[in-house]
């Protein structure tokens, strides 16, 4: 048998139900408000952390979406994470990488620059970010920007000789011979035993009519490769042109 419900109990129940609904709705609205507020903040904003715990949660959600190849959703979570904690480097890097993957280069570039500026130690992530940003700036023809990152990329990854030739050839083909010269000089400094850099530097210098400097470069290549008849012939031919 059910016990009779007293009028007093009904009054208490009716009184508590709206409070419970209000509490649940208020929490839901509060969570949505927080996420909306963070999501609408400018991702370039810098400042103190608003909510580090929420930023980590959003970062993990972004990583989950990324693993599921839901890249737009991942980007949205990373943006919110950065707004919650502008100093969360992993979120900045992951958002930059996501935009790069989506070929949204104009949005990726400032994030890569921001990530690079946040680094204090040499890491694989830093090397990749510098190389990616340098490449994008070169592709856009922003050579005054790209040369800074190219020179840094050579310094950070001194064993990657192929990147030196790609950089230098891009600049030289674009009529930026002085930047090509800077790249080869940086390559020689990073890899002093690589005589091909000296030879390539000499070629650009000769192209620019700087024969005496070209001769010095060819001589460097010959010294590093004493068995190379090709380098020896370059030195002899250039010296003959200079009347030496």
Image: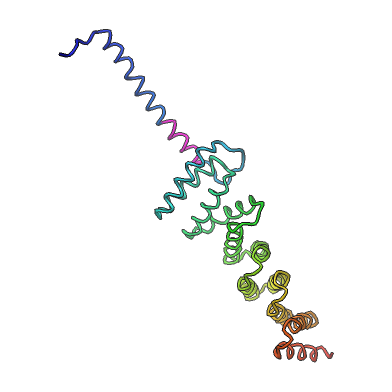
Looking at the rendering, the stretch of residues picked out in magenta corresponds to: 29-40
Residue most extreme to the left: 1
67 displayed left or right of 112: left
- Relative to 158, say whether 208 is above or below: below
Membership of 238 in magenta stretch: no
145 displayed left or right of 15: right
Q: Nearer the viewer, residue 45 or 70?
A: 70
- Relative to 124, say whether 65 is above or below: above
Total count of labels? 0
Please identify the quarter of the rendering in which residue 12 is found: top left
Q: Position of residue 118 (x, y in %)?
A: 63, 50
Please identify the quarter of the rendering in which residue 177 is found: bottom right
| Scheme of image coloration | rainbow
Q: Residue at x 77, y 91 (%)?
A: 236
Residue most extreme to the right: 244
Membership of 39 in magenta stretch: yes
Q: Residue at x 33, y 17 (%)?
A: 16
8 displayed left or right of 213: left
- Relative to 157, say whether 184 is above or below: below
| Quarter of the image that includes the C terminus | bottom right
Q: Nearer the viewer, residue 34 or 227?
A: 227
| Quarter of the image that includes the N terminus | top left
Magenta: main secondary structure equals helix
- Relative to 165, say whether 31 is above or below: above
Q: Position of residue 97 (x, y in %)?
A: 51, 56
């Amino acid at each position: 048998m059910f016990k009779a419900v007293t009028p007093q109990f009904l009054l208490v129940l009716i009184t508590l139900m709206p409070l419970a609904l209000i509490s649940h709705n208020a929490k839901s609205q509060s969570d949505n408000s927080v996420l909306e507020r963070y999501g609408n903040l400018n991702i370039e904003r810098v400042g103190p952390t608003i909510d580090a715990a929420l930023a980590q949660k959003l970062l993990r959600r972004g990583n989950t979406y990324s693993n599921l190849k839901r890249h737009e959703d991942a980007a949205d979570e990373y943006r919110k994470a950065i707004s919650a904690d502008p100093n969360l480097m992993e979120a900045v890097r992951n958002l930059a990488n996501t935009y790069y993957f989506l070929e949204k280069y104009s949005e990726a570039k400032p994030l890569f620059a921001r990530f690079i500026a946040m680094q204090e130690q040499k890491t694989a992530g830093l090397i990749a970010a510098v190389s990616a940003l340098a490449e994008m700036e070169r592709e856009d023809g922003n050579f005054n920007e790209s040369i800074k990152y190219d020179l840094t990329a050579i310094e950070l990854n001194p064993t990657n000789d192929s990147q030196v030739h790609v950089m230098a050839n891009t600049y030289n083909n674009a009529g930026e011979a002085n930047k090509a010269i800077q790249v080869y000089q940086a390559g020689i400094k990073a890899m002093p035993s690589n005589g091909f850099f000296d030879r390539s530097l000499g070629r650009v210098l000769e192209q620019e009519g700087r024969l005496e400097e070209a001769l010095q470069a060819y001589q460097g290549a010959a010294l590093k490769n004493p068995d190379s008849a090709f380098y020896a012939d370059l030195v002899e031919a250039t010296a003959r042109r200079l009347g030496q």
